[in-house]
Image: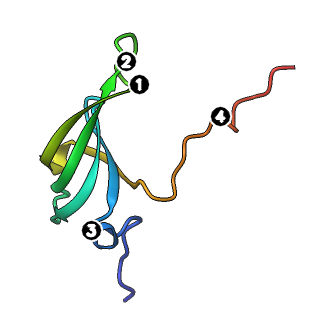
């Protein structure tokens, strides 16, 4: 029987930067220090991205430092490495206006 692999192996991200989206729309970014099988995460040097007052699901450039944070696994929606990612200026999948 083949070993089941996760789409994202968190062990490879220890001591590296990650961005975490939490239920309710909050987003934080920090250095992953630890995790467990329930996806509880420990982040250090964490910053939280402020949300847009008009659209609470969008973040803005304003941040606040949070330091050492424990994210409960039940609230974690997405974990992504910060290295090798960049924001696109335009959605490549949006239909072009003619």
How far apart in space, not on screen, are marks 3 and 4 (Cα)?
31 Å
What's the mark number on residue 58?
1
Q: Estimate the x, y position of residue 39 in percent, counting from the top left.
A: 20, 57
Report helix, strand or loop for mark 4: loop
State left or right for residue 87 relative to residue 79.
right
Residue 59 is drawn in which quadrant?
top left
The structure residue drawn at horizontal position 26% and vertical position 68%, both measured from the top left corner, is 14
Circle 4/circle 1 CB separation < 8 Å: no
Earlier along the polypeptide chain: callout 3 or callout 2? 3
Residue 72 at x, y percent in the picture: 14, 47
Query: Alpha-carbon neighbours of circle 1 within 10 Å: few (<14), some, or many (≥20)?
Result: some
Residue designated by label 2: 52
Which residue, given by chain and number where applicable, does mark 3 sit on? 14
- Assign the C terminus to one quadrant of the image: top right
Provide residue 71's location: percent of width, then percent of height.
Answer: 16, 47
* Pointer 2 or 4: first along the chain: 2
Q: CA distance from mark 3 to mark 2?
A: 30 Å
Residue highlighted by disc 4 = 91
């Amino acid at each position: 029987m083949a070993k089941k692999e996760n789409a994202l192996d968190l062990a490879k991200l220890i001591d590296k930067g990650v961005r975490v989206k939490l239920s309710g729309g909050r987003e934080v970014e920090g250095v992953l220090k630890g995790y467990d099988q329930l996806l509880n995460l420990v982040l250090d040097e964490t910053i939280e991205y402020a949300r847009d007052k008009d659209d609470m699901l969008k973040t803005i450039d304003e941040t606040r430092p949070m330091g050492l944070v424990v994210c409960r696994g039940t609230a974690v929606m997405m974990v992504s490495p910060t290295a090798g990612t960049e924001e696109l200026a335009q959605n490549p999948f949006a239909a072009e206006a003619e």
